[in-house]
Image (cartoon, grey):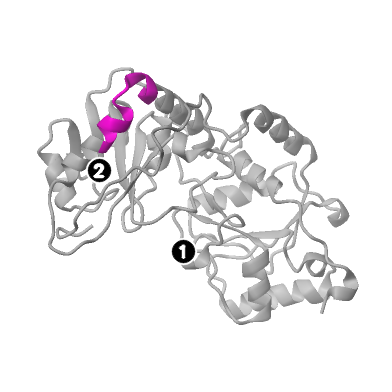
């Protein structure tokens, strides 16, 4: 947001929505389906053409966790999905040759034109005219980092990795909230809104806390954490959720790449506020933001329900070196499990 940005705020959620006690879609079926996945899900992984190098720790953790998991099978006929491993910096031509080799040497790609395959690419793969890359992009499930570029993400097919949350620091959930909101630059660009919030004693605004423990304390004693989707750094959403600091996400468009969107009802654990650029500049954004928060969560009981859902969801944002039940790795696998049903083309229909 620039200093000349006029903040137009509106709450994406309807205040008349029924109050829910769970952050999950279909709470009665979530855990039974999860247990079924643990028992049944099988993945066949192709041998990478060279040692893999990933650009982010989350990608590396996902890959190492998968390789050491019980989900892998050596029998491709038992597999629900197929993993196509390649390094983050793989050139487009090399990636096309890789897919072509799968098409030519093995029968599994052609059965679905890649629809029962998935791959990891933090930045995502853009659209391309090459047949191999077209099928990889349009059909296979892409696992990318959050947030990702709109041009490289296909909603309802692709998924994003939850940003890393430190498993070594157990969240301390304070019942007393000293601040209405916490704003950390880097998470939100310095703008007229940030400058206005500086003058509001109910908001804590700082560039960077002195250390990790200080940041975690800030999260635990603040009702809301302000984050900006798009140009800002929104990776802190994982820690905000874990420490019971309800995320307030400022965005100029609907968000379709939130982590764990197949599992979590994000409207029950976060606030989405829209801003729009308008000519003539403007002030009063902080006042309007405060009005939205007070109007929607002025009822302390409603706020505590949302905060409780936020903390419950927080366990799913933790990445462990050795995966634990219901952590980020297993919830990523659960989202893949939900995508295991694909259309298998008859051999005669394959070009």
Q: Which mark is residue 191?
A: none
In the displayed structure, 188 sits above or below 183; it is below
Q: Is residue 64 magenta?
A: no
Residue 102 appears in which quarter of the rendering?
bottom right
Please tell me whether mark 2 sits on a helix, a strand or a loop. Answer: strand
> Residue 249, image x and y in percent?
35, 45
Tell which circle, 2 or 1, labels the residue nearer the N-terminal end. 1
Which residue is at 49% across, 63% downward? Answer: 123
134 over 293 or under it: above or below: below
Question: In the rendering, at what x and y percent does residue 94 appear?
Answer: 62, 77
Residue 150's label in the rendered image is: 1
Left-right relation of 156 to 139: left
Packing grade of label 2 (10 A; few <14, some 14-19, many >=20) is: many
Q: Residue furthest front?
A: 16
**What residue span does the magenta drawing correspond to?**
292-303
Residue linked to disc 2 = 184
**Which quarter of the figure has residue 307?**
top left
Tell me, yes or no, if residue 318 can be seen here: no
Left-right relation of 252 to 21: left
> In front here: 35 or 297?
297
User: Local crowd at mark 1 within 10 Å, few (<14), some, or many (≥20)?
Assistant: few
């Amino acid at each position: 947001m620039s200093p000349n940005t006029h903040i137009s705020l509106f709450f994406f959620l309807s205040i008349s929505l029924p109050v829910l006690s769970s952050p999950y879609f279909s709470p009665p079926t979530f855990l039974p389906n999860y247990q079924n996945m643990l028992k049944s899900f099988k993945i066949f992984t192709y041998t990478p053409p060279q040692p893999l190098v990933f650009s982010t720790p989350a990608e590396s953790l996902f890959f190492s966790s998968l390789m050491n998991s019980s989900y892998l099978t050596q029998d491709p006929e038992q597999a629900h999905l197929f993993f196509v491993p390649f390094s983050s910096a793989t050139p487009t031509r090399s990636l096309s040759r890789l897919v072509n080799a799968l098409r030519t040497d093995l029968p599994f790609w052609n059965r679905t034109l890649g629809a029962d395959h998935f791959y990891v690419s933090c930045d995502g793969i853009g659209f391309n005219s090459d047949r191999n890359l077209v099928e990889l992009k349009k059909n296979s499930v892409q696992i990318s980092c959050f947030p990702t570029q709109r041009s490289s993400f296909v909603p309802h097919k692709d998924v994003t990795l939850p940003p890393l949350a430190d498993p070594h620091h157990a969240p301390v959930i304070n019942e007393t909230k000293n601040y209405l909101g916490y704003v950390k630059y880097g998470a939100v660009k310095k703008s007229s809104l940030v400058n206005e919030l500086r003058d509001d004693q109910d908001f804590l605004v700082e560039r960077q806390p002195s250390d990790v423990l200080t940041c975690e304390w800030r999260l635990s004693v603040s009702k809301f954490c302000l984050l900006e989707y798009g140009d800002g750094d929104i990776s802190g959403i994982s820690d905000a959720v874990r420490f019971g600091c309800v995320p307030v996400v400022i965005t100029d468009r609907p968000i379709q790449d939130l982590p764990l969107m197949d599992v979590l009802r994000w409207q029950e654990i976060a606030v989405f506020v829209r801003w729009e650029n308008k000519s003539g500049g403007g002030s009063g954004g902080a006042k309007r933001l405060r009005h939205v928060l007070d109007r929607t969560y002025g009822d302390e009981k409603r706020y505590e329900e949302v905060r409780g859902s936020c903390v419950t969801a927080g366990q799913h944002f933790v990445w462990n070196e050795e995966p634990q039940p219901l952590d980020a790795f297993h919830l990523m696998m659960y989202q893949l499990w939900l995508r295991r049903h694909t259309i298998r083309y008859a051999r005669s229909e394959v070009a």
